[in-house]
Amino acid sequence: MEQAVPSSPLEQVHSRIATAARIAGRKADDVTLIAISKTKPAEAILDLIAQGQRVFGENRVQESQDKWPAIRAAHPDVQLHLVGQLQSNKAEDAIALFDCIHSVDRPSLVTALAKAQDKLGRKVPCFIQVNIGNEEQKGGCAVAELPALLTQACEAGLEVVGLMCVPPAGIEAAPFFALLDKLADDNGLSRLSMGMSDDFETAVQLGATHVRIGSALFGKR
């Protein structure tokens, strides 16, 4: 009996995740697919929701505030993750809106998020973003500063669940994913937010628990 060929982009991505997980001796269910819907209209998001996707990611607080309240009112089981850089003055808005924040990267933001959580009475799981390639233009804490930032975040009451990275563009991502995996292991963290449309299969094979997929689902921006 022939195996069904995945037809939709969502089915294709799930199939590729499953294959990469199988190669690594992992379960596909251990990998959360985050559909990155930045700049995409509600119609495109609702189409993926209708196909069964339940976890989405956005880059900007303002765009999410404009777009998501109506979607979430109709689909309260959908989760929304913030994967882009977060300004400290938007911390309270982020805590109010998102179910997870992937871009905690500096002491001032830790302080702002802790204050917002206390004010709103809402805890939101967080990933510490690591500047894994030591790139000046990218967000993320330096590798050497990770232990101190983790200590501060835990003492402030943030629920740090893992590490996140965006490897340098144009070169092999595997060494950077492997380094993030080691850093997480060294610091007692079990979740890894890494891998995007061009490299998520490599990320899954190297331990990713959350992959952030945009163009492979929605098409090129």
Image (tube, rainbow, N blue to C red):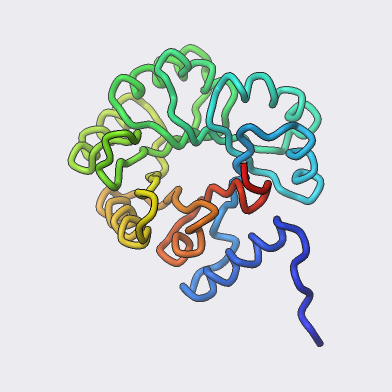
Q: Nearer the viewer, residue 152 or 177?
A: 177
Q: Residue at x 49, y 27 (%)?
A: 123
Up the image or down, 136 lies above or below 163; here it is: above
Q: Which quadrant would the N terminus be assigned to in this image?
A: bottom right
Residue at the outermost left position: 144
Q: How many marks?
A: 0
Q: Is residue 7 left or right of residue 209?
A: right
Q: Residue at x 76, y 80 (%)?
A: 3
The spot of residue 23 in percent (x, y) is 50, 76
Q: Residue at x 41, y 39 (%)?
A: 127
Up the image or down, 30 lies above or below 124; here it is: below
Up the image or down, 130 lies above or below 91; here it is: below
Kindly indicate the quadrant of the structure image that contains residue 11: bottom right
Q: Which quadrant would the C terminus be assigned to in this image?
A: top right
Q: Is residue 14 left or right of residue 192?
A: right
Q: Is residue 100 left or right of residue 186?
A: right
The spot of residue 220 in percent (x, y) is 62, 46
The spot of residue 212 in percent (x, y) is 54, 47
Up the image or down, 192 lies above or below 28; here it is: above
Q: Residue at x 33, y 31 (%)?
A: 105
Q: Is residue 150 left or right of residue 77?
A: left
